[in-house]
Image (cartoon, rainbow, N blue to C red):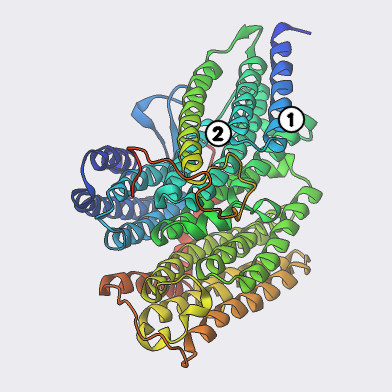
């Protein structure tokens, strides 16, 4: 059964990518919706299998490590596979209705969407450094293609800027991989972390880790390297923005986090951990402030992504040189933050897309009066915003609460400023959108009404993000148990 | 110094030159060439550093083949995007964030593959 599930997870997206490449938009849409259904079922079955029997290592085609592709199927990986199925499925469903089938080039959305999904599954399950690189490149190239889908010069400019940043980031990562392979002659993460104590503190290896993390930080849009993100996420079609913010940036962060947790103990240092955390912290405050200052709705949401990504990097200082319990709290907080941000941000971008479609303008102040006309979408936007602010009982609250406890538990009180300040600033930018939409003296009374299902999808995602705080315990129990012992094999 | 270490050092030098070009050059095609230079440098480091008891290690050679395929795919995508961007905007750099809209000057050429 496991064989069938793994094959389904890795090969269905690739097969679907080829199938959808060969047919027009409407037929591709039907095929893709079927594929989304299959993928969701397979992801759920794998999640249930791991939840009941624990994680395992899987060798693709029965070939052992240096030649074959080794996959690590543990709790964290299947949690993210599941998240991809939920968010990716929702975005695919939304895109099928949102994109205009009359524009011929929109049919390329489907193959790119499936390649993206294949790459994401590859990253979540990958256990060796080089295959992670290949999966990461598959994600980047399809994401760039999706950004360029709009076709205008602005979209292309954003896509090229994104491509350049992504390529540079991948090469930095690959150079780090080359240095590590040169030292140990192994690419398997588990194998290297067993060999590491011998090479502890070697300058070359530390440089390799710094290179890899810097490259991945560039791809994740950590604070000073975030310049490419807002244009790309702001100009893409709404379902594409949702996919990019919810899943694509998480893929490179996930690799950085795994590297840090496996290698950080021997190659990391207090200074490096604090530096990465500080950049994340500045990102939270600066990104939120810029989100508050934007005049265009989708730019608000895009800068909010820069801020929310910053929280993730608090994992680095909170898991280095601290007690096992604090480190576990930080890891759980990070996982919940990834999940809740993915759900909330996808909901927010999809809802923003509906609002923009309805008023016919992407400016925040053009939203005047929309509260009466499109309350449902606005409500989804607000619910997602509540999760981003970190109010109870949302997933965002549970995540920030765990991070807060980890900061106090390790005596690093300075991260509290980031956690509290970031929450207040995100409240500010969400309320600003609300204020604009409740103004009644607008002279526009011509609103376009998006179809019902377009409004339902962001609502479902927002409710999931809201409910995550209530079911955090079972989610964490699946994700947490194999996390610490993973990698051995 | 062994020959393989020489390859690795040459790779590092290529990476350095490429990175310098990637950051300082504004023209998109030059940037892309610089990217390819960094890529070649990384591949050289990968093949050069990995030696097993003086024998070349076959695994990184397989990796580099895959890496070259990825680099070609990325380059092809970038060339297509840059070409299309140039047709639409008349710019070869990303610098002009808000291009001055002078009607009639540098009109986008009408081509068969125009989506409009």
SS label for mark 2: helix
Residue depicted at 45% across the width and 22% down the height: A67
Q: Where is residue A350 in the image (x, y as percent from the top left)?
A: 40, 67
Nearest to the eye among marks 2 and 1: give it. Answer: 2
- Depicted B42 relative to depicted A140: above or below: above
- Depicted A97 relative to depicted A1: above or below: below
**A196 to the left or right of A432:** right
**A323 to the left or right of A148:** right
Please report whichever mark, 2 or 1, sits nearer to the chain's N-terminal start.
2
- Depicted A34 relative to depicted B56: above or below: below
Q: Which chain carries label 2?
A: A
Q: Where is residue A361 in the image (x, y as percent from the top left)?
A: 44, 72
Q: Distance between the residues labelled 2 and 1?
A: 18 Å
Q: Mark 2 points at which residue?
A: A129
Q: Position of residue A460 (x, y in %)?
A: 35, 72
Tell me, yes or no, whether the two marked residues, 2 and 1, touch with CB atoms within 8 Å.
no
Name the residue nearer the viewer: A323 or A206: A206
Residue depicted at 61% across the width and 53% down the height: B97
Q: Where is residue A431 in the image (x, y as percent from the top left)?
A: 56, 82
Q: Say whether residue A439 is visible.
A: yes
Name the residue at the bottom extreme.
A441
Residue depicted at 41% across the width and 58% down the height: A237
Name the residue nearer the viewer: A99 or B54: A99
Name the residue at the front extreme.
B104
Q: How crowded is mark 1: few (under 14 residues within 10 Å), some or many (20 or more)?
A: some
Give the image quarter of residue A397: bottom right
SS label for mark 1: helix
Q: Name the residue under label 1.
A: A199
Q: Say whether residue A197 is visible.
A: no
Q: Mark 1 lies on which chain?
A: A
Name the residue nearer the viewer: A142 or A40: A142
């Amino acid at each position: 059964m496991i064989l069938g599930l793994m094959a389904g997870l890795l090969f269905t997206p690739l097969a679907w990518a080829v199938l959808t490449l060969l047919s027009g938009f409407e037929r591709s849409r039907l095929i893709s919706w079927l594929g989304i259904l299959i993928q969701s079922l397979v992801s759920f079955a794998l999640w249930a299998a791991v939840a009941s029997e624990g994680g395992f290592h899987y060798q693709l085609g029965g070939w052992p490590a240096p030649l074959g592709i080794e996959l690590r199927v543990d709790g964290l990986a299947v949690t993210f596979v599941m998240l991809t199925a939920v968010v990716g499925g929702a975005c695919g469903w939304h895109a099928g209705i949102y994109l205009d089938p009359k524009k011929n080039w929109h049919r390329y959305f489907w193959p790119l969407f499936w390649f993206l999904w294949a790459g994401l599954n590859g990253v979540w399950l990958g256990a060796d450094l080089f295959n992670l690189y290949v999966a990461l490149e598959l994600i980047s190239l399809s994401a760039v293609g999706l950004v360029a889908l709009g076709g205008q010069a602005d979209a292309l400019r954003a896509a090229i800027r994104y491509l350049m940043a992504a390529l540079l980031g991948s090469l930095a990562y690959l150079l780090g991989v080359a240095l590590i392979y040169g030292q140990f002659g192994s690419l398997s993460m588990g194998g290297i972390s067993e060999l590491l104590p011998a090479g502890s503190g070697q300058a070359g290896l530390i440089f390799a880790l710094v290179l890899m993390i810097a490259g991945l930080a560039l791809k994740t849009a950590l604070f000073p390297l975030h310049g490419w993100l807002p244009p790309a996420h702001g100009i893409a079609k709404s379902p594409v923005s949702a996919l990019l913010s919810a899943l694509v940036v998480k893929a490179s962060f996930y690799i950085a986090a795994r590297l840090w947790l496996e290698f950080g103990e021997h190659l990391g240092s207090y200074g490096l951990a604090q530096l990465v955390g500080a950049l994340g912290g500045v990102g939270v405050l600066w990104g939120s402030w810029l989100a508050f200052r934007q005049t265009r709705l989708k730019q608000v949401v895009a800068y909010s992504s820069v801020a929310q990504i910053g929280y993730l990097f608090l994992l680095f200082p909170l898991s280095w040189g601290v007690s096992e319990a604090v480190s576990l709290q930080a890891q759980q907080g990070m996982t919940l933050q990834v999940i809740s941000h993915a759900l909330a941000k996808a909901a927010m971008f999809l809802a923003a897309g509906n609002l923009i479609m309805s008023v016919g303008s992407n400016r925040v102040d053009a939203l005047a009066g929309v509260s009466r006309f499109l309350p449902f979408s606005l409500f989804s936007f607000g619910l997602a915003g509540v999760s981003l602010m970190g109010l109870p009982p949302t997933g965002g609250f549970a995540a920030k609460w765990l991070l807060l406890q980890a900061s106090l538990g390790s005596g690093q009180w300075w991260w509290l400023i980031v956690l509290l300040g970031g929450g207040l600033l995100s409240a500010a930018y969400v309320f600003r959108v609300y204020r604009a939409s409740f103004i009644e003296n607008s002279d526009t009374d011509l609103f376009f009404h998006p179809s019902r299902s377009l409004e339902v999808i962001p609502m479902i995602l927002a409710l999931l993000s809201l409910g995550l705080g209530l079911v955090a315990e079972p989610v964490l129990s699946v994700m947490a148990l194999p996390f610490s012992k993973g990698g051995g094999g | 110094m062994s020959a393989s270490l020489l390859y690795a050092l040459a790779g590092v030098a290529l990476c350095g030159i490429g990175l310098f070009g990637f950051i300082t050059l504004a023209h998109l095609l030059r940037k892309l060439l610089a990217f390819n230079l960094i890529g070649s440098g990384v591949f050289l480091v990968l093949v050069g550093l990995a030696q097993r008891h003086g024998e070349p290690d076959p695994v990184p050679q397989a990796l580099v083949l895959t890496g070259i395929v990825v680099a070609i795919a990325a380059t092809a995508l970038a060339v297509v995007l840059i070409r299309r961007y140039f047709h639409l905007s008349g710019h070869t750099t990303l610098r002009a964030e808000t291009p001055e809209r002078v009607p009639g000057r540098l009109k986008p050429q009408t081509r068969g593959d125009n989506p409009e």
